[in-house]
Image: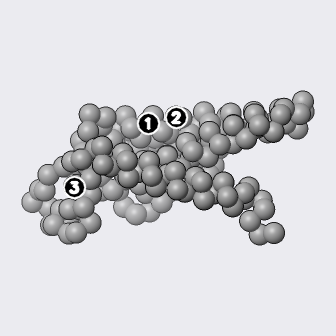
Amino acid sequence: MSVQPKSLFKFFAVAEMFTWALLITGLILRATVGIPAELFTLFGGTHGLTFLGYGVVAALVGVNQRWKLAKIVTGIGLAIVPFATYPFERYLAKTKSLEGAWRTTESDNPRDKNWFDRLFRWFIARPLVLILALTATVAILFFTLLMLGPPSEWGN
């Protein structure tokens, strides 16, 4: 992959933050000036798609960088908090948690010998297959969530 973990994570962290701003702006405009539902749906859909993409990238980069599970879950969970992904990215950059390339080859580390790491490296070594698999996963999640409707209606 030519895009390194650090730059991919930063791109999605910043994009997720901007789509939060877009969504909040849409909410304010809907409440104050009554923007058309289609426009608000566009804002919400853009944020939802970016939100899911960020979650997938946070998990992918976290596994690659060998973050502890708690850090991966925190990274994904911070997407729920408006504007929290960028400060988290800055923290990761400061602590050098984003440094390094994609792990495409097995090392002497015993962790590289398990089935999960072998599968991970197989996908990382085939970026087109990885991108297609992740795109399909995000699309399935996105359309499933669209079918479920807004979270406020899930319990009704």
**Which residue is painted at 52% across and 56% down in the image?**
140
**Disc number at residue 10?**
1
Disc marking residue 14: 2
Q: CA distance from mark 1 to mark 3?
A: 24 Å
Q: What separation in Å lies between label 3 and label 2 (alpha carbons)?
A: 28 Å
Along the viewing direction, whichever of 77 and 136 lies nearer the viewer = 136
Disc 2, SS: helix
| Image depth: mark 1 or mark 3 in front | 3
Q: Is residue 73 visible?
A: yes
The residue to which callout 3 is attached is 122
Give, as a three-letter code, the residue at label 1: Lys
Kind of residue at badge 2: Val
Q: Front-most of 109 and 41?
A: 41
Give amino acid for label 3: Trp
Q: Is residue 151 above or below residue 156?
A: above
For the residue labelled by badge 3, is the local secondary structure a helix, a strand or a loop? helix
